[in-house]
Image: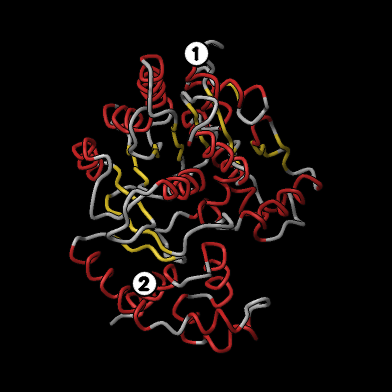
């Protein structure tokens, strides 16, 4: 067994240990730097990680769960499914910064989960012609403006499946985040689209084989949809619904959220209108508006070839200079893009950007964009 396989087995087993949960599992892995060492040094956890008690150490003595994890890994290998552990290079780095990020994910497909531009499109399961047309038009126009964007949704009825199909129709990669294991597709009516997505995108889940699409799993799934993306776009939503939960999660993760408005009398525009009214989502009218707000205008970024030399800012640290260099090459960028490009954790990035603001090197624009001042 390789070290990587061992880490995969212990990561899977950790998700099954009762009483730990997403936040607890992440804290353990970050504290010990690997799931393998969480189990290997379980008797020393209380000494190494503040707040860990003997009950958790005892719960980690679980040979039956490790055997179940070995069985799961066998299924993954047989079906050519990637097992992405927490520190795996292919693990979504944006998601890793979220407090309740899963310590392991399962992925089948060919998409880059750390692509430069990632958005999710969510909405009601009862999409109207208005919502369906918005999906098609928005992604058609977005393709022309930002052809490398990755579109994420939940493969559900309504807006989700329309977002996936519109992405495929326009040659965009698209990933479906599932509320069950990869031994099934739910709803089964979407199987053909799911298969098509494997060639241009993929399917992602945190759930083990045999997990059924129970109601509470969809709420858990939504945090991955929100956390792995730069922005959430709500197309249509009633006054209550899963897409509003995704929007709230996006806000809690400090990600941008947008909503298309609708007529005040339309049931499936009420949720979007409320988000806009309550300043929980920016009003969205077009792909061009979205790209400009996010700073994703690739053409203008390519044209900008400003070169900033280190001696212009002699008092910059190495990490500060990396940020300056990227802003010089790419133009205005959002914090999540800078996190991906520099591999600097988001909490540390916030502090560095604040220092750069104080030094007069960068400034914040509308939409959370950072502009280099030269």
Query: For residue 278, which numbered disc appears in the image?
Result: none
Q: Which residue is mark 1?
A: 266
Q: Residue at x 34, y 80 (%)?
A: 64
Answer yes or no: do the residues labelled 1 and 2 have beta carbons within 8 Å?
no
Q: Where residue 266 appears, x then y in whole percent?
A: 49, 13
Q: Is residue 138 left or right of residue 223?
A: left
* Crowding at mark 2 (Cα within 10 Å: few <14, some 14-19, many 20+): many
Q: Quadrant of the C terminus?
A: top right
Q: Residue at x 55, y 89 (%)?
A: 43
Q: Is residue 160 left or right of residue 305?
A: left
Furthest-front residue in view?
A: 215
Q: Where residue 240 appears, x then y in whole percent?
A: 53, 30
The residue mark sitting in front, 1 or 2, is: 1
Q: Where residue 88 appears, x then y in whole percent?
A: 42, 65
Furthest-right residue in view?
A: 358
Is 13 drawn above or below residue 185 in the view shown?
below
Is 107 drawn above or below residue 131 in the view shown?
below
Q: Quadrant of residue 209?
A: bottom left
Q: Is residue 81 left or right of residue 101?
A: left
Rounded to the nearest whole Å, what is the CA distance between mark 1 and mark 2?
48 Å
Q: Nearer the viewer, residue 304 or 333?
A: 333
- Element type at marker 1? loop
Q: Quadrant of the N terminus?
A: bottom left
Q: Which residue is mark 2?
A: 8
């Amino acid at each position: 067994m390789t070290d990587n396989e061992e880490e995969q087995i212990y990561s899977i087993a950790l998700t099954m240990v009762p009483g730990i949960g997403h936040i607890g599992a992440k804290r353990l892995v970050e504290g010990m730097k690997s799931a393998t060492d969480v189990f290997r040094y379980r008797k020393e956890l209380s000494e190494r990680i503040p707040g860990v008690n003997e009950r958790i150490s005892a719960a980690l003595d679980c040979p039956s769960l490790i055997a179940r994890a070995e069985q799961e890994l066998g299924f993954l290998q047989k079906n050519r499914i990637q097992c992405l552990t927490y520190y795996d290079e292919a693990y979504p780095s944006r998601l890793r910064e979220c407090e309740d990020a899963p310590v392991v994910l399962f992925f089948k497909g060919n998409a880059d989960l750390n692509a430069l531009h990632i958005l999710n499109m969510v909405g009601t399961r009862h999409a109207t012609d208005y919502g369906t047309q918005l999906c098609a038009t928005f992604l058609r126009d977005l393709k022309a403006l930002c052809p490398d964007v990755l579109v994420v949704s939940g493969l559900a009825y309504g807006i989700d499946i329309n977002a996936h199909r519109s992405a495929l129709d326009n040659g965009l990669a698209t990933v479906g985040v599932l509320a069950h294991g990869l031994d099934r597709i739910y709803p089964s009516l979407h199987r053909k689209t799911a298969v098509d997505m494997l060639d241009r995108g993929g399917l992602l889940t945190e759930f083990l084989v045999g997990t059924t699409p129970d109601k509470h799993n969809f709420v858990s799934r939504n945090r991955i949809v929100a956390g792995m993306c730069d922005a959430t776009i709500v197309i249509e939503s009633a006054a209550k619904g899963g897409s509003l939960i995704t929007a709230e999660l996006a806000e809690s993760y400090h990600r941008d959220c947008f909503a298309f408005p609708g007529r005040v009398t339309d049931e499936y525009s009420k949720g979007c209108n409320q988000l806009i009214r309550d300043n929980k989502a920016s009003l969205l009218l077009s792909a061009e508006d979205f790209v400009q707000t996010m700073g994703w205008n690739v053409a203008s970024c390519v044209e900008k070839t400003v070169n900033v030399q280190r001696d212009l800012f002699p008092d910059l640290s190495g990490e500060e200079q990396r940020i300056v260099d990227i802003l010089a090459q790419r133009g205005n960028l959002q914090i999540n893009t800078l996190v991906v490009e520099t591999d600097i954790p988001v909490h540390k990035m916030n502090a560095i950007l604040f220092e750069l603001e104080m030094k007069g090197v960068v400034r914040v624009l509308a939409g959370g964009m950072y502009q280099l001042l030269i």
